[in-house]
Amino acid sequence: MPFAQALREAGMAAFVAAMLAVPLVGFRLADTSTGLRIDTRFDWVAFGVGGVFLGRLLLGLLRGRGPGSGLRLDLPKLPSNAGTLFGAGLAIFAIVMPFTPMADRYVVELAITVLIYVMLGWGLNIVVGLAGLLDLGYVAFYAVGAYSYALFAIHFGWSFWICLPIAGALAALFGVLLGFPVLRLRGDYLAIVTLGFGEMIRIVLLNWKEFSGGSAGLTSIPRPSFFGIQFTNNPDPGVIPFHEYFGLDFSPMQRITFLYYLIFALALATNFFTLRLRKLPIGRAWEALREDEIACRALGINPTNVKLSAFALGAMFGGFAGAFFATRQGFISPESFTFIESAVILAIVVLGGMGSQLGVVIAAGFLILVPELLREFSQYRMILFGLAMVLIMLWRPQGLVAHRDPSIRLGAAR
Amino acid sequence: MSLLTVEHLTIRFGGLVAVDDVGFSAEDGRITAIIGPNGAGKTTVFNCLTGFYKPDVGRMTMRRDGREYLLERMDGFRIAREAGLARTFQNIRLFPRMTALENLLVAQHNELHRASFHSLAGLLGLARYRSAEKMAVERAAAWLDRVGLTHAADDEAGSLPYGDQRRLEIARAMCAGPRVLCLDEPAAGLNPKESADLAALIRDIKAREKIAVLLIEHDMSVVMEISDHIVVLDHGAKIAEGTPDHVRADPAVIAAYLGTAEDAA
Ligand SMILES: Nc1ncnc2c1ncn2[C@@H]1O[C@H](COP(=O)(O)OP(=O)(O)OP(=O)(O)O)[C@@H](O)[C@H]1O
Ligand SMILES: [Mg+2]
C-alpha cells in the first residue's frame, strides 16, 4: 500500500479512536471529601490515539494491495478426510474424557457448557450457515425450550424425556412464528427484526410474572433422572436412588457425568441430523437459497417453505438445548437469555466458518474456554477476547474451517 | 392454439413505458427470438413471463396438457413449477459455492422433495427416495454430458470459466423440466467458437426435447441462424415480427439498429 494511503487510513483510525477515547477515557469522576470532581486524563488519550495511529500505519504498510490481502493465515492443504478424522478423534476424546484423571467436577461442568454451545451453534448453523438467514435472536428459542421444559416439569411433573420433544416442538413453532413476518427481509433488516424478536421474548418472560416468575425466574425445576432412577443422597422413602441401584457410593459426580453424556448425545444427534439433511433436497434448497434466492424462484422452489423449514428446525435444536439447560441448572431466569447469548452463538457460527460443523466445535471451544482460562486476568478478559476475535477475522475472514464438502459427488452417486 | 400466448403486455416504471402493448406467441419445437437495441425491454418481458414483475396490462396464457395457466396471476415459483417456464439470466445466476452437479439437483428440487416425502423418507434412507435420487443424478449427468461439463461435475459452479457457467445455467434450466425455455443473452461474452457450439446446443434442445425456446440475443449470427421466428422490440414496442429473412429486410428494424437521423441528433 502506498505510504500516503496508509497515512490517510492511520489518520482516520486515530480520529475515530480520539472521538471514542475523549469521553470514555479522557474524563473521570473522582470521589473526594468535598463531593464529586471531574478529573481529566488527556495524557492517556494521547497515548491511546498515538498507539492506534502507529499500529494502523504499520498494518497498512505491512499489507500488500487491497484490503485484507497479504495478512491471511493460509492453513496447509489437508487431505480431504482430515476433517472427518479430526471430528472422530474429538468425539472419542469426548467419550473417554470423564474417566481421565483430569476430569474433576470443574472440568466436566465446563465441558457441559461447551457442549451446550456446540449444540446451539449447530442449531443456528442451519439457519445462518446453510440457509444464509442472519438471525440475531436465536436465544429466544433457547429460552422457549428452557421455559417449556421448566413449566411442564414443574406443573405437570412430566419427565425429561416427555418434556424434551414438547420443548423442541414449541421452539419450532416459535421459529415459524418468527419466520412469517420476516419472509421478505434479508441481511441487515432480517438481523434487526430477529434481534427484536429475541428481546421481545425475554421482556415478556421478565414481565409476565404469573406465568414465568418474572425476574425471579423459575426455581426447583426437576433434575434429570437416569431413566426414572434419581440421583440423590436423601431419597423419598421407598425410592431407590442411582448409587444404591448400582451398588455405588453416593457422589455428586454421578449426576454431572450423566448430564455430560446427555448433552453429548443431544449434540451428536443434532450433528447427524443436520449432516443427513444437508444431503437431502431440503438441505440443498437451504444452501441454494443462501446462494441466490432469485434463481431458486426461477427453478420453482417456494422460498417461503424453505425459509420456514430452516427457521423451524434451527429453533427446534435451540429448544432441545434450552430444555437441557433448564434441567441442568434447576433454575432459570430471563438473565440467562440476553442478547449477548445470541451474539456469542452467532460468533461461534461465523468464526467456525459458516456452514461448517467442525468449525462450530472449534469455535465453541475457543469462545467458551478462552474467557474461562483468562479468568485470572479478569479485568482484561474481554479486551483479550475481543482482540483474539479481531485477529482471527483479519487472518481468516472466511472462518476457521472454510472448506465446504459437496453434498454429493458424481462418481460416488453412480 | 399456441403453447404460450402473450397479448397487450405493458409495464411502466414511473414515467418509463418499458414494455408497450407487446404480443407474440411461442410454440413447441420452435425457437422464437426477441431482439432489439439495449434497453428495448427484452429482459423486462422475461421478467413478466417468469413472475418477477407484474405487468400493468396484458395477458400471458400458457396452455399445456389441457390446462390453461394465466401467468400474470401466478407467483414466480409456481410459474416455473406448474406452468413449466424455466429461464436463464442475463448476468448468470448460478449457486456459485455449490458444485455443478448440485446446481442441477437443486433444479429438480420439487420432484425430489416429494419423493423424499418432505425429508422423512430421505432421513430414514428409504429405497423410494434413493431410487428417486439416483434418477435425478442420472438426469443431471446426462445434461452435464450434453453441455460438455462432465469433467467439472464436482467443481464449484462459481469457479468455472465464463462460457462453462453459461452452459451450466442452461443445463440447470433444462433439469427443471420446462415446456418453455427462456434464454437471456446466452451468447453474451462467448467467443465465436463457443457461440457456434451454443447455437448447436440450442438447436439440439429444440429438436430433441420438442419444447418452445424463447431467445433474447444480441449476436445476430446466432439469432439469424437458429431462430424460426423473430420479434423485434424498440423502446418497449414491437416494431416488427417474422422469419429471419423477413426481419432482416425490414426498414424499421434497420432504422432501429442503425439509429435514424433524429435519434442521432
Ligand atoms: N426494475 C426496474 N425499474 C425501473 N426501470 C427498469 C426496471 N427494469 C427495467 N427498467 C428499464 O426498462 C427498460 C428496459 O430494460 P430491459 O432490461 O428490459 O432492456 P433490455 O432490452 O433487456 O436491454 P439489454 O439488451 O441492455 O439487456 C430500461 O430502460 C430499463 O432501465
Ligand atoms: Mg436484457
Image (cartoon, rainbow, N blue to C red):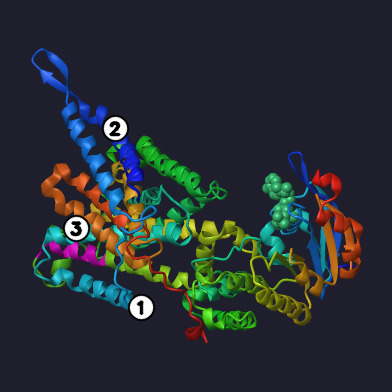
Foreground residue, B100 or B90? B90
Q: Where does label 3 land, which residue?
A: A110
Judge whether B144 appears above or below A380 on screen: below
Q: Please name the amino acid that badge 1 sits on.
A: Ser
- Where are the magenta residues, as a range? A250-262
Q: Main secondary structure of the magenta part?
A: helix
Q: Where does label 1 land, which residue?
A: A80
The residue at the point 57 percent across, 74 percent down is: B105
Q: Please name the amino acid that badge 2 sits on.
A: Leu
Q: Where does label 2 land, which residue?
A: A20
Q: Secondary structure at mark 3?
A: helix
Q: Secondary structure at mark 2?
A: helix
Q: Earlier in the sequence, mark 1 or mark 3?
A: 1
Measuring from the top left, give residue A330's x and y in whole percent: 24, 51
How far apart are the alpha carbons under marks 3 and 2? Answer: 36 Å
Number of residues whose C-alpha sits closer than 10 Å to that of mark 2, classed few (under 14), some (14–19) or many (20 or more): some
